[in-house]
Image (tube, rainbow, N blue to C red):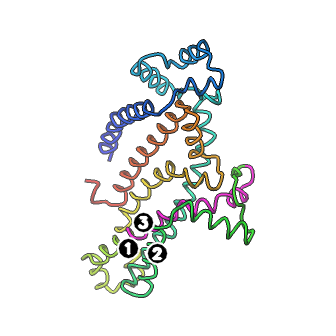
Amino acid sequence: MLAFLTRRLLQLIPTLFFVSVIIFSLQQLLPGDPALAMAGEERDPAVLAQIRREYRLDRPVYVQYVYWVAGVLSGNLGESMRLKEPVLSLIAQKFPVTLQLALMAIVFSLTIGVSAGIISAVKKDTGVDYAVNMVALWGISTPNFWLGILLIFLFAVHLGWLPASGYVGPFEDFWLSIETTILPAFVLGNSFAAVLMRHTRSAMLQAMGSDYVRTARAKGLAERIVVLKHAMRNALTPVVTLGALELGTLLSGAVLTEQVFSIPGFGKLIVDSVFNRDYQVVQGVTLITATTYILLNLLADIAYVLINPRLRS
């Protein structure tokens, strides 16, 4: 296990290097001049030259990259050109918001998707199986923004049960924080719950047709024990991996949901930064998101080994 962890950690170094190169290179392809955007209407040449010197925009691209990487390694992601705040400070403000939203979405997805997948596999080729598959197909096909607007109209406007938009931190008012994030979390986790249900069903059907499950039934074990203890544990191996990777996807893919519900998270931050050509923020947010995704991939591999004893050798 230690050798496996060491090998995987060493693999992260070149991966993060190539990710940083790609992030910096793609940022250079964004249209427009950030110095012009910062100067506003007064396009004074002296002001433009000062801005370019201050943010090293007058230096070659490779020199800018070296300075940026040196800053990242020292914990400095630069300063927002627009807000004049450290990028790390902005990320520290916005990341917990999106993280809370993503974790709640994962809870919804795992609860609904895994449960529905197990029930569908156990009730294979019955009315319950067909109904669950139809709901899963609906979940995959429904656009997040449309579902979000529909839920706002139903639960906020018509019934008045939940807030239509906005965000309150859990340390300010815990229950109000849950109320403001329950709808966007459900919208964000809806499609993944459907995907998770299909994967769980497929894995459960494969596990329930295995020799060890037939042996357990031949021993006279109760069907509940056969399903939950023998079949489900083996079936959850790919599901755990999928869940860990999807958390990274949710962190980076909450842009539309946060816009619909006016939640000040990562999605809104990066959209505003792109429109304002605030390249330092775009680079910082993208780098943190990519690093989080890579670390979650590592955790998924570790969980894969812990769940499946056959992989430990």
Please, what is the three-letter code of the amino acid marked with disc 1? Arg
Q: Residue at x 36, y 32 (%)?
A: 17
Q: Secondary structure at mark 2?
A: helix
Please, what is the three-letter code of the amino acid marked with disc 3? Val
Residues packed near mark 1 inside 10 Å, few (<14), some (14 to 19) or many (20 plus)? many
Residue 251 lies, in percent from the top left, at 51, 49
* Mark nearer the N terminus (3 vs 2): 2
- Tell whether 91 sits left or right of 232: right
- Tell whether 156 sits left or right of 33: right
The span from disc 1 to disc 3 (Cα, nearest Å) is 10 Å
Label of residue 201 in the image: 1
Quadrant of the rendered image containing residue 242 = bottom left
Residues packed near mark 2 inside 10 Å, few (<14), some (14 to 19) or many (20 plus)? many
Residue under pointer 2? 116
Does residue 192 belong to the magenta stretch?
yes
The span from disc 3 to disc 2 (Cα, nearest Å) is 11 Å
Whether 134 is drawn above or below 83: the answer is: below
Range of residues picked out in magenta? 172-199
Please, what is the three-letter code of the amino acid marked with disc 2? Ala
Residue under pointer 3? 195
For marks 3 and 2, give the one nearer the viewer.
3
Q: Residue at x 50, y 53 (%)?
A: 250
- Tell whether 60 sits left or right of 40: left
Residue 175 lies, in percent from the top left, at 72, 59
The span from disc 2 to disc 1 (Cα, nearest Å) is 8 Å
Q: Secondary structure at mark 1?
A: helix
